[in-house]
Image (tube, rainbow, N blue to C red):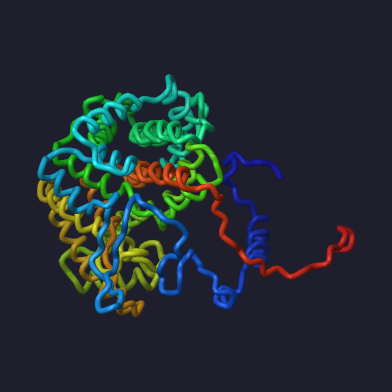
Amino acid sequence: MARTNSGYSAITPEFAGLAQKMAENSMINPDLYTKYNVKRGLRDLDGKGVLTGLTDISTIIQNKEVDGKLVPCDGELYYRGYNVNDIVNGLLDDNRFGFEEVTYLLLFGEMPTATQLHNFKELLVQYRTLPQNFVRDVILKAPSEDMMNSIARSVLTLFCYDTNPNDTTISNVLRQCVQLISVFPLLSVYGYHAYNHYLRDKSLYIHRADPSMSTAEVFLSLLRPDRKYTPLEAKVLDMALILHMEHGGGNNSTFTTHVVTSSGTDTYSATAAALASLKGPKHGGANVKVYYMFENLKKHISDWKDDEAITEYLEKLLDKKAFDQKGLIYGMGHAVYTISDPRQRILKQSVRQLADAEGYNAEFDLYERVERLAPQVIGKKRKIYKGVAANIDFYSGLLYSMLNIPCELYTPLFATARIAGWSAHRLEELVNGGKIIRPAYMSISNSKTYQSLADR
């Protein structure tokens, strides 16, 4: 079978029959999962996650005990014992950036003093550089349409530039983690510029990171041709980074970090695995889905204040008759929170502030209407009465669009924040681990008698 000009992407007719055969021989009777009490998705039947580990990095609260019973409550999120609301309010009161400070908190388990914070920022600046010719030889030479794949490739290639890549001592892994936290904005934005230039025929801009800037400022200044941004834009992006940087050990990409780290592999491989997980539309890619869902909604509804028309559209979404026909209202519902997502509550206020400043009030009002109407539609159509609330992905797409950040960078922005949490969890696994994580799978195969090739 000759290779076509389309490279590895051509699906020849043979694959249709092969795919059908594979599917038929791979299908497992759904009743067997119930029979053997399999925790699909590592979840109990009520949706509660199966306990697989312990962590001291963050705490998620979604219910409280009332009269001896657990009842749902407004969600709360704690970083190393500190309520995220208190952290955010403290930063707002001081009118300063906080991503670097919260990164210190996640890594070292305590709030830094002014001197410790200054020294840590200096360390981040020191490592916020890529090896000589790395941008030219790695990022620009093979541009990708998918920025998450571009970042993963860059991360794996950085292994080759590390003189001590396989050393998993705490000091060396900490050094590697700090370096990755520092360069993620560069890998993300440079990867986008390569794609934008070579695959979309746009102008190429490669700026150097200003050592005086915060992580949020670096991201915006590297992205924009004129490097200009407003203080409000940078502060709101900094807030979004803080809210995305950590969310317990059970989310898919962080659990992936624990699993891969437990095998004893290197930091670059563990980070690439986490990136692969975060890329999925059921995880970090959800914010892109929210944005495109709203773009589709706008094409079908002329009056953004028409609750009846919006409700009808949402019903079509659930009936798989609108947008991507997946039957989902993206940005609504969460695996843990039922009453409210604390990150969404905080982010929404910042988005509102930016919408007022940038003239996006109509768009913000539309998002609010969908946020109000969607739980009613979901409750009616899906008969879910435990509560469905907007999650952090719901407003983040609107935020990024107001910042003129292209959709290709929505999930990389998530990764730029979450690399701090992944790093903290990788270190925690190395300090407290020892056993490789290996859950059980039960085989349901029947014994078969081997036949020679001539007899089949």
| Camera-side residue of 183 and 36 | 36
Vertical side of 240 occupied by 50: above or below: below
| Camera-side residue of 353 and 39 | 39
Q: Residue at x 24, y 37 (%)?
A: 112
| Camera-side residue of 132 and 194 | 132
- Where does the image place residue 223, in percent across and percent down from the top left? 28, 34
| Camera-side residue of 408 and 261 | 261
Q: Is residue 181 left or right of residue 272?
A: left
Q: Is residue 77 left or right of residue 143?
A: left
Can residue 62 be spotted in the picture? yes
Vertical side of 454 occupied by 119: above or below: above
Q: Residue at x 51, y 67 (%)?
A: 40
Q: Quadrant of the N terminus?
A: top right
Q: Is residue 225 left or right of residue 33?
A: left
Q: Quadrant of residue 97?
A: top left
- Where does the image place residue 246, in percent across and percent down from the top left? 33, 49
